Image (tube, grey):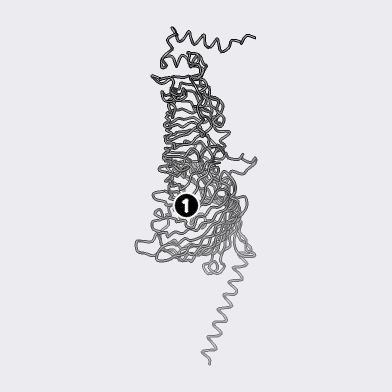
C-alpha cells in the first residue's frame, strides 16, 4: 500500500511540474512570439534553400501565438538563376506549427502544421538551350536530413506563367490561373493527397482534380523497385476551344474557331504502370464551316520510368454535323513525337476545310496559352494517317469511294496518296495540298483523270449536258477559298485533256457548214448542185479531241490549237473557254470529201478535204457557229473541186458569183 501510494504521489508531483512548465512556456511564448518567428524564419529559409538548391528568402515574418502558434510571411520567394524571374512568388503566406513538438523540444523542433499561400505565382522558364528552370533544382541536404514535412498546404488564387527565352524578346504567357489547391501530407514517407481547381485556357475555373499518392521512396526508385501507386480523377467542363487554340501550334489556330469541350479522366495503378482512361465530348464545335458535335474515348498505359515512350490511343472518335460524318481512331506518341489517325465516314463537305476564317472578335482574350515558340515546336509534330469516305463534296462537285493517305505538316495538309470515283471515272489526287494557316486556305489541286463521264459532270455542275464523252488527262490548279464564283477569276494552272467518243450536243456542225458550202459551190458555178444535210439530231460527234491549256483570269486558254475529229471532218481551234462556259474560239475545219460529196448528192467529185474558217462564240449551252463567208468558202473549195470549163479563174468567178448574190433584181 505504501509503495503504491508513494508512486501516485510522485506522478502527481511530476504532472504538476509539467503543468507549471507548460504555463510558464506558454506565458513566455505569449509575451515573446518573436522567438517563434526567429526559429521559423531561419528554418524556412535554410530548409528551403537546401532542399531546392536555390535561395529561399522572406522579406518579413511576423509570429503569433493565437489562435494557433504560427507566423505570417511576406514576400516568400524562391529565386531563379541569373536574370530569370523568381521560380516562386507568394506576397503573403500564413504558417501554423504543431504545438507539442515545439514544446517538447523547447523550440528546437518546429514542424509546419499548415501553410497557406495567397496570390502565388509559379514562373516556368524555357531557356535558350531548350531546358526548363525546374530541371536544375538539386537538393544539397543529406538524405538523412530530408525529413521535413508539411501537414497541409493551401494555395489560393495561384497563377502559372510560362516564359520562353528562345523566342524573340522572351515571350511569356499564362498557362493556368485562378488556382485553388489543397495538398496534405507533404514529406518523405507520407501518403500525399490533394485537390485542385483552376482555369485552363478559360477566364473562370473549369478544371478540377483530386488525387492520392502512396508514400514516395527516398530518392528516385531503382530498377525493379515499385513506383508509388496513384489514384487520380480529372474533370474539365466547358473548355473553350477558341481559348484553347493558344495551346496549339501558331499555324494551326485556324483549324477550330469555336466550341466547348468536356473531359473526364481517371488514373489508376496496375502492374507497375499508370493506366489513364477517359472520355470527352464537344459541342458547338466549329472548324471553318457550320457547327458540329463530337465525342471520343482515350486510354494509355504509362511506364513511370520511361514517360517519353508513352502513347495515348483515341477510340470511338466521332464528328457529326452539317456536311460532316466522320469516325475512327487516332493515337499520339511522345517519342518519337507523332500523331496517327484512321478516319472513315459517309460524308465530308470541303467547305469545312476551305471556308475563310471568321473575323477575330474584338477584345478577345488571347493571353491564355503557351509561348509562341513552344507552340511552334508542337507544329513540328509528325501528323499523318488515312481517310476513307463514301462521299466527298465541294459544292456541286461530288467524289465517291474516296481513299487517301495524308499528312499535316506545320499547318499544311498534303495528300501523299489518294484516289476517288468521279462521275463514272477515276481521279488520282496524289500531291494535292491545302495550306490551312491562311485566313482563306490556299490550295493546289493535282488530278489525273481517267474515263470521266462529261455528261454526268456537266449535269451535276450546271444542270445541262452540252458535252458528252469520256475525258482523261492531267490537271494542276492553284487557288484559294471555297467559293468557286469568287475564286475562279484568280485560279491559275494548266494541264491537258483528251475526250473520246464525244458529242457536242448543243451545236450541229454539219448543219451549220452545209448551207455555206452550197453558197460557195454556187459561186464556183455549181448552182443547184448542193442540197441540204440532215441534222444529226444529237449535235456534233467528236471522235477524238485533244487539248493543252493554261488557266488564268477566269479563262482556259489553249497553249496549242485544240485538235478534234468528227464524222464530217477534222478541225483545229485556238482561243479560250471561260470557266463560266463562255466561248471565244476560232480556227479551221477540213470538211471531208465524203461530206462534201454527200451534200451535192454525188454530183461533184471532191478531190481533197475542203478547208473552211471556223469561229465559235456564245456559251457551251448556246454556241454560235460561224463557218466563214461564202468568199472564204469558195477559196477553200477551189483547190478541191474541179471547176467548169467555162471558168478561167475560179477566184474571179467566185467574186462575180458573190456580186450576183447581192445584185438587186430588176423590176
Q: Please determine whether, in this image, residue 73 is positioned above or below residue 402.
A: below
Label 1 SS: strand
Where is residue 131? Give x, y as percent. Answer: 43, 46
Identity of the residue drawn at 49% across and 15% down: 632
Residue marked by disc 1: 344
Q: Quadrant of residue 33?
A: bottom right
Q: Is residue 236 visible?
A: yes
Residue in front for this viewpoint, 135 or 36:
135
Q: Is residue 533 above or below residue 432?
A: above
Q: Residue at x 46, y 9 (%)?
A: 651
In the foreground, 241 or 180: 241
Tell me what residue is drawn at x 56 percent, y 51 percent. 176
Residue 254, image x and y in percent? 54, 42
Name the foreground residue: 320 vs 365: 320
Q: Is residue 90 visible?
A: no
Q: Nearer the viewer, residue 614 or 591?
A: 591
Q: Which of the image's four quarters has the C terminus?
A: top right
Extreme left residue here?
223
Count the labels in the image.
1
Q: Quadrant of residue 572?
A: top left
Q: How far across and how far down the image is residue 261, in percent?
A: 57, 53
Q: Position of residue 3 (x, y in %)?
A: 51, 89
Few, some or many C-alpha atoms within 10 Å of disc 1 (few <14, some 14-19, many ≥20)? Answer: many
Amino acid at each position: 500500500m505504501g509503495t503504491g501510494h508513494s508512486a501516485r504521489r510522485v506522478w502527481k508531483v511530476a504532472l504538476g511540474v509539467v503543468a507549471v512548465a507548460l504555463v510558464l512556456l506558454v506565458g513566455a511564448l505569449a509575451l515573446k512570439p518573436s522567438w517563434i518567428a526567429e526559429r521559423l524564419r531561419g528554418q524556412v529559409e535554410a530548409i528551403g534553400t537546401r532542399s531546392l538548391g536555390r535561395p529561399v528568402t522572406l522579406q518579413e515574418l511576423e509570429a503569433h501565438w493565437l489562435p494557433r502558434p504560427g507566423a505570417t510571411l511576406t514576400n516568400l520567394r524562391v529565386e531563379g538563376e541569373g536574370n530569370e524571374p523568381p521560380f516562386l512568388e507568394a506576397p503573403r503566406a500564413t504558417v501554423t506549427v504543431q504545438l507539442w513538438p515545439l514544446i517538447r523540444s523547447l523550440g528546437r523542433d518546429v514542424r509546419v502544421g499548415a501553410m497557406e499561400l495567397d496570390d502565388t505565382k509559379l514562373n516556368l522558364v524555357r531557356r535558350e538551350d531548350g531546358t526548363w528552370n525546374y530541371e536544375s533544382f538539386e537538393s544539397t541536404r543529406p538524405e538523412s536530413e530530408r525529413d521535413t514535412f508539411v501537414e497541409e498546404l493551401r494555395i489560393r488564387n495561384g497563377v502559372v506563367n510560362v516564359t520562353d527565352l528562345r523566342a524573340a524578346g522572351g515571350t511569356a504567357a499564362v498557362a493556368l490561373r485562378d488556382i485553388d489547391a489543397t495538398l496534405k501530407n507533404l514529406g518523405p514517407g507520407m501518403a500525399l493527397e490533394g485537390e485542385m481547381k483552376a482555369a485552363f485556357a478559360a477566364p473562370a475555373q473549369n478544371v478540377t482534380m483530386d488525387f492520392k499518392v502512396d508514400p514516395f521512396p527516398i530518392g528516385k526508385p531503382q530498377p525493379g523497385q515499385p513506383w508509388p501507386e496513384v489514384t487520380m480523377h480529372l474533370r474539365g467542363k466547358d473548355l473553350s476551344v477558341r481559348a484553347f487554340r493558344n495551346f496549339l501550334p501558331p499555324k494551326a489556330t485556324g483549324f477550330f474557331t469555336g466550341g466547348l469541350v468536356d473531359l473526364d479522366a481517371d488514373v489508376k495503378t496496375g502492374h507497375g504502370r499508370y493506366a489513364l482512361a477517359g472520355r470527352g465530348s464537344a459541342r458547338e464545335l466549329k472548324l471553318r464551316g457550320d457547327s458540329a458535335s463530337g465525342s471520343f474515348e482515350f486510354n494509355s498505359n504509362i511506364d513511370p520510368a520511361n514517360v517519353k515512350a508513352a502513347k495515348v490511343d483515341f477510340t470511338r472518335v466521332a464528328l457529326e454535323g452539317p456536311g460532316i460524318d466522320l469516325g475512327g481512331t487516332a493515337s499520339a506518341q511522345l517519342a518519337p513525337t507523332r500523331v496517327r489517325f484512321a478516319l472513315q465516314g459517309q460524308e465530308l463537305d470541303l467547305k469545312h476545310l476551305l471556308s475563310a476564317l471568321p473575323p477575330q472578335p474584338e477584345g478577345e482574350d488571347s493571353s491564355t496559352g503557351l509561348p509562341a515558340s513552344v507552340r511552334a515546336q508542337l507544329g513540328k509534330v509528325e501528323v499523318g494517317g488515312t481517310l476513307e469516305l463514301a462521299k466527298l463534296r465541294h459544292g456541286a462537285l461530288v467524289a465517291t469511294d474516296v481513299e487517301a493517305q495524308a499528312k499535316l505538316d506545320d499547318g499544311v495538309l498534303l495528300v501523299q496518296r489518294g484516289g476517288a470515283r468521279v462521275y463514272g471515272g477515276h481521279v488520282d489526287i496524289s500531291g494535292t495540298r491545302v495550306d490551312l494557316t491562311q485566313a482563306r486556305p490556299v490550295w493546289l489541286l493535282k488530278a489525273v483523270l481517267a474515263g470521266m463521264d462529261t455528261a454526268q459532270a456537266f449535269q451535276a455542275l450546271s444542270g445541262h449536258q452540252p458535252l458528252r464523252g469520256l475525258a482523261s488527262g492531267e490537271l494542276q490548279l492553284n487557288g484559294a477559298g471555297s467559293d468557286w464564283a469568287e475564286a475562279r477569276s484568280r485560279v491559275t494552272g494548266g494541264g491537258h485533256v483528251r475526250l473520246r467518243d464525244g458529242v457536242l450536243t448543243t451545236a450541229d456542225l454539219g448543219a451549220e457548214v452545209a448551207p455555206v458550202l452550197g453558197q460557195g459551190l454556187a459561186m464556183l458555178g455549181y448552182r443547184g448542185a448542193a442540197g441540204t444535210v440532215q441534222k444529226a439530231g444529237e449535235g456534233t460527234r467528236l471522235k477524238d479531241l485533244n487539248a493543252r491549256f493554261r488557266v488564268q483570269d477566269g479563262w482556259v486558254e489553249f497553249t496549242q490549237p485544240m485538235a478534234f475529229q468528227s464524222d464530217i471532218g477534222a478541225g483545229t481551234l485556238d482561243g479560250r473557254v471561260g470557266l463560266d462556259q463562255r466561248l471565244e474560239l476560232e480556227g479551221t475545219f477540213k470538211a471531208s470529201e465524203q461530206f462534201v460529196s454527200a451534200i451535192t448528192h454525188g454530183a461533184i467529185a471532191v478531190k481533197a478535204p475542203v478547208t473552211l474558217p471556223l469561229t465559235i462564240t456564245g456559251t457551251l449551252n448556246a454556241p454560235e457557229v460561224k463557218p466563214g463567208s461564202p468568199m472564204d468558202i469558195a477559196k477553200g473549195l477551189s483547190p478541191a473541186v474541179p471547176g467548169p470549163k467555162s471558168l478561167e479563174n475560179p477566184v474571179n468567178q467566185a467574186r462575180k458569183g458573190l456580186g450576183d448574190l447581192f445584185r438587186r433584181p430588176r423590176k
